[in-house]
Amino acid sequence: MDRRTARDGVSSLAPYDADCASYTESDLVAALRSAGIESGDLLFVQASLDALGVARGRATADDRCDMVLRALRHAVGDAGTLIVPTYTFSFCRRQRFDVAESVTDGGPWSESADFLEHVRHQPDAVRSYDPIHSVVAIGPTAQQVVKDLPSTCFGVDSLQHRLRREGGKICMIGLDLHEATMVHHAEVMSAVPFRYRKLFTGEIAQQGVIRREGWIYDVRITAPNTELEPSRIAGEARARSVVRTATVGRGFLQVVQAQPFYDLVCAALAADPWFTVKGPPADPIDLAQDCQPSAALQATMPPDASMEAIVRTLWPLPRDIVSDGYDSALAAIATQLPMHVHEYPTGTEAFTWIVPEKWTCHEAWLETLDGRRLFSYADHPLHVVSYSLPFEGVVSRDELFRHLHVHERLPEAIPFVFMYYDRDWGLCCSRRLRDSLVDARYKVVIRTSSGFGTLKVGEVIAPGATEDSIVLCAHLCHPAMAVDDLTGVAVAVGVMRELLRRERRRYTYRLLIVPETIGSLAYLSDHQWLVPHMKGGLFLEMLGLDNPHALQRSLAGDTEVDECFMAALKAGDPAGWTASYRSVPGNDERQFNAPGIRVPMLSLLRILRPSADHYPYREYHSSFDTPDIVDWNRLAESQRLVLRMIDTLERNRVPINRYQGEVCCSRHGVHIDPSTNPEAHRALFKTMDLIDGTRSIVQIARECGAEVDAVQTVMDELFRRRLIDYGDAAPQGSECR
């Protein structure tokens, strides 16, 4: 009678012998030697001991674990180093990872957790700090291999990367080759389409010190197409003689050198990116869509919709940063302007950030144990923390309150709370409702899902005479809120409509509609070639309130854009005020001013001063931020002010004097009527004194203590009389005075 052992396409045919159902320590050592393990090896071991059968003469599981460890240590000798996985998936499960105490999960080989724990508890074992896929190493190079790993499970310089770099080997005991975690590393490094980077955050404890960390784990899109394929890898390894196999007990072990095995998998993935999984190949977005169908959300607006129509139409949508609600809102705006939509898949690196997953809340509620519903997501989308994890269960009042958020100042309002990069569940309600909760326990239901998606940035371009560009920006996220920042979006749309109508523009203008922070980062990291052409910008937010305008200056604070916009503010809104960088609510202007970018972007708001009781405004980040608090006349004023700022910048050139000495006004007919333009008349001689090719129009106006419009009138008169010139051609087009 014959016995066939088949794993991952590897078959060994041997005469049946009852003794083969058990094995000894010497049998295992011999098998390891037969498969190519030598003294001094760096060996990564993944094991399913149950697949080998009975360890002869070993009465307990501890005995078997000890025997297997001795055999492995004997095989690599005193000069060799052993590594075994001690995966905990702690951050995936919202658990603190304690380097010394967190117990090995075992992953798909849970029956081997006893063996892995046995190795972890050896006095000379060194454990890595990976809060998801930790390993322990034993041997002279243990510290070198597992210490100071970067915060990535399978990326550059990860354990698997170091293993192949150091000439290590992989031993699969009772397991198929496709289960080797080196396959994950090859998939990550090959950027396969069915994996994406995901940021997990949590706490790591070591020797009594607790620190917060973020860790990257390249996860698979969950779909039948992405399940591991059990035969191709082993078949390719046999065909290329990369693997050596030996029988042990009723099972077998396989050994591969890490680098050749990695090279084999990467080469196969280069030819077929779906080589390691069942397939068939599919668009990742389609796969994710099948797993997480889009919500039926639609927003329609008439052509050339008013600012009020834009705000009222988009306000109810659940516009979380990567969501169907955001996509629907952006699609509606794209009907108003000639827009190009940039898409950035989940997991895309955006400088030091990572594009998060698409998030959907299907339903959620809080109720008493007798079934009385207290509030639900259907009542208002702010009742659920944006990007909350799913949760269902009965919790104590104390536990509920740890996850139930209220507004700091408004007892009747629901707060806006988000956890884009922290993993937890959460609900929100009014403080008055929370204070009425007196039962000992409550039932929580939060049905949310997260998965692969695409972050979307809308870009509208009004081309100018040069590639030098001015960026207008507003964020479209913040579900069910109007002032923050649909008012900024509406003003931006109105401004771009006007700019597109103009026949000529000195600068190119780019409007970016983004999800807050990550949208600007994704766009900038993808358009780094464009950054040197960005001469400045303006972020628009929290407009439409009955407050004077506030202009937050750029980081530098003294650029041409700063001077022009401040001059326009002074003329267009005398009650307006300016603030230094990061002294009022910050937004995407931070990303443009940041190191490595340094585009001087300012922000325009209508907020209270920081000393006010309800700064930045009473309804900020709450369910009270509705279209009903928007002053549509103020919103129109904001649009006119932005256009005035743009016109000031467009006209701000450096005049060059073609005269010497004081101008004889009578001879050249230079005259400005004091009755029709008294300020320009007063500024005439001061202005002419300062024209020497070193000052711009705005700088001259500041030094004269005059409005830019008055100085521009003088310049226009002198230019007509051929007394001054400019270094560039005078722009044509409409102006907003």
Image: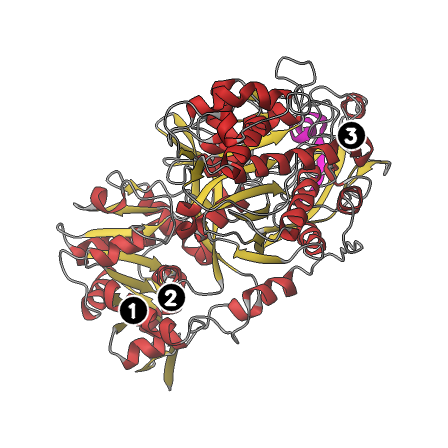
Q: Which of marks 2 and 1 is nearer the N terminus?
A: 2
Q: What stretch is highlighted in magenta?
A: 390-405
The image's colouring method is secondary structure
Report the amino acid beneath label 2.
Leu
The circle on residue 175 is 2
Q: Do the residues labelled 2 and 1 touch (CB within 8 Å)?
A: yes
Report the amino acid beneath label 3.
Phe
Q: Is residue 500 magenta?
A: no
Q: Which of 471 and 714 is in front in this view?
A: 714
Q: Where is residue 619 in the image (x, y as percent from the top left)?
A: 74, 26
Q: How busy is the neighbourhood of tag 1: few (under 14 within 10 Å), some, or many (20 plus)?
A: many
| Residue found 37% across the figure and 30% down from its top | 694
> Does residue 605 appear in this view?
yes
Q: What element carries label 1?
A: strand
Q: Is mark 2 on a helix, strand or loop?
A: loop
In the image, farthest residue toward the front: 667
Q: Give the label, 1 or 3, closer to the camera.
A: 3
| Residue found 40% across the figure and 55% down from its top | 112
Q: Name the residue under label 3.
A: 624
Q: Name the residue under label 1.
A: 254
Q: How busy is the neighbourhood of tag 2: few (under 14 within 10 Å), some, or many (20 plus)?
A: many
